[in-house]
Image (tube, rainbow, N blue to C red):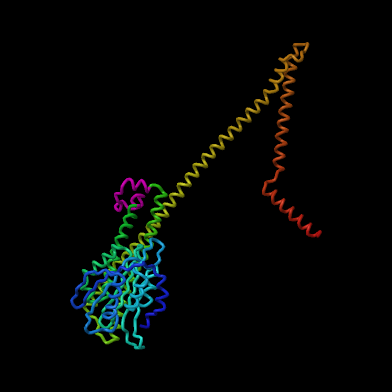
Amino acid sequence: MEAMESDDIQSLLPLALVTEETIINVRRVRYQSQTVSDRISLDEEGLSEELQKINRAIVGPKSFAAEREFVLLSTTGDPARRTICPRPLNISRTSLASLMDACEFPAYVLRACIFKRFHMSHHTQYSDNGSQRPEALVVLLRNPQHGHSVNVALRIRLVDLSTVCFLSVLNEDTSRTIEKTFSERGRLISTHPLYFLILVMEIRSVEHNAAFEKTLYQIYEVESATEMTPPFWKMQIPSMTKKWLEDYDNLLRRLHELHTQLCHFDTVSVFYTKWAVFLFGSIDLLEELRGEVGLPPMSKRESRIIRERIQFTRTRSEYTVTKTKEMLARVKGQINVVFSLVTQKDSKVNIAVAEHSNQLATLAANDSETMKTITVLTLLFLPSNLITSIWAAGLFEIEDRSRNYQVYIVATMTLTIAVFAVWLLYLQCSSLRRKGMRPIHMAALDYLSLGGKASQIAAQKT
């Protein structure tokens, strides 16, 4: 096949995250009897033998003796090198190369599987002889929603719709659900191979809706705890949860967590609407290719049934997209309100601190006035105390004792006036000294300017 590009496959194989051992499960749906075979687990040797049978019966030119069938090869793991919880594909690199070669999967399969994002594409295969007649349609899908990836590669032979499918699922519960549905809905797959992709879409959609409902419950819980919802929308929440959400740190952490989940839900929900459109396009392309090889189209009844089934899931996904955008807006509103409340609370705290600081400043000013009063009183009575002490010490005596009080009064007043004069002179000198001092940043500017002038003068001299 032209689309095989074996060189590209060999260069892409080292990029796939795989194990050293091989465990592949095989199941079949036989179109004529509409029966599903039991699951068979194969190792590397058993897979090699099975791939030879698949190549002869389904991949190569149609043999009239071979019965039309849908073969499902499934395993667990993800070949993409994930940054969170990597789990390699449960197949060896040699077995993966053999599977790609036997099933004639193009290199696009590996490119899609090792890509960490969502992917959908289909590729038409022609024979190597240059014929314009298409031989097969390859459909690729990668769905990594919520960290649990599902990879599907379908190769549908146009002449009889015989199909080989390689399925890898990271989550074992999802893998069991898909295999169980495959067993129960084998009749649908026997009517049209693309029913398998529809079933996978429905299973993944149910998982997505379940996770979305849990997130909605958490949002309703936060809105009820913060009383930011109408009374008839309020929920009865546990007291411990309400107390935990009263802490703004916990509340903001929860809101940002919900916002992150909703952003992912928005991407996943939009993907499902695109998935439905992709399935519609794949059905139309398959019918067009079958018409090119001269095969009759699908009956109107089958076409209507399969399209209505796709449309049902698409409609639910469109509602989920709308609901996700609504919840994103509500969570953003919650975050903005909480930030405003936190800012308001901080402002109140700052105002209280400022008022307290003002009170402290007032008390400090009062203390300063008190100290000044004490100082003035001390200066006022200190000279008289000094004169009294000297007088009482008997260092000198006045013969005319009637003049003692006059001398005392004159000496006390003179000394008091001298003390106050010296104090006032000190205050005046201190005030003049403070006025003459320049701020430190102005002094620094003067220093820099003087330094610049000095350097210019030195440069001129040299």
Position of the C terminus, as image quadrant, is bottom right
Using the image as rendered, state which of residue 32 and residue 283 is in the foreground.
Answer: 32
Using the image as rendered, state which of residue 36 and residue 330 is in the foreground.
Answer: 36
Q: Residue at x 71, y 24 (%)?
A: 416
Q: Residue at x 78, y 11 (%)?
A: 399
Position of the N terminus, as image quadrant, is bottom left
Total of numbered circles in the picture?
Answer: 0
414 lies above or below 280: above
Q: Position of residue 255 (x, y in %)?
A: 39, 54
Q: Is residue 226 magenta?
A: yes
The image quadrant of residue 142 is: bottom left
Using the image as rendered, state which of residue 52 and residue 182 is in the foreground.
Answer: 52
The image quadrant of residue 187 is: bottom left
The reply to whether residue 311 is visible in this rendering is no
Q: Residue furthest front?
A: 45
Q: Position of residue 447 (x, y in %)?
A: 72, 51
In the shown orientation, is residue 130 left or right of residue 421?
A: left
283 lies above or below 88: below
Q: Residue at x 42, y 75 (%)?
A: 11
In the shown orientation, is residue 348 left or right of residue 98?
A: right
The image quadrant of residue 31 is: bottom left
Q: Position of residue 169 (x, y in %)?
A: 32, 66
Q: Position of residue 240 (x, y in %)?
A: 33, 46
Q: Is residue 429 magenta?
A: no
In the shown orientation, is residue 19 left or right of residue 423?
A: left
The reply to whether residue 390 is visible in this rendering is yes
Question: What segment is highlighted magenta in the picture?
Answer: 222-245
Q: Residue at x 75, y 11 (%)?
A: 401
427 lies above or below 320: above
Q: Residue furthest left?
A: 33
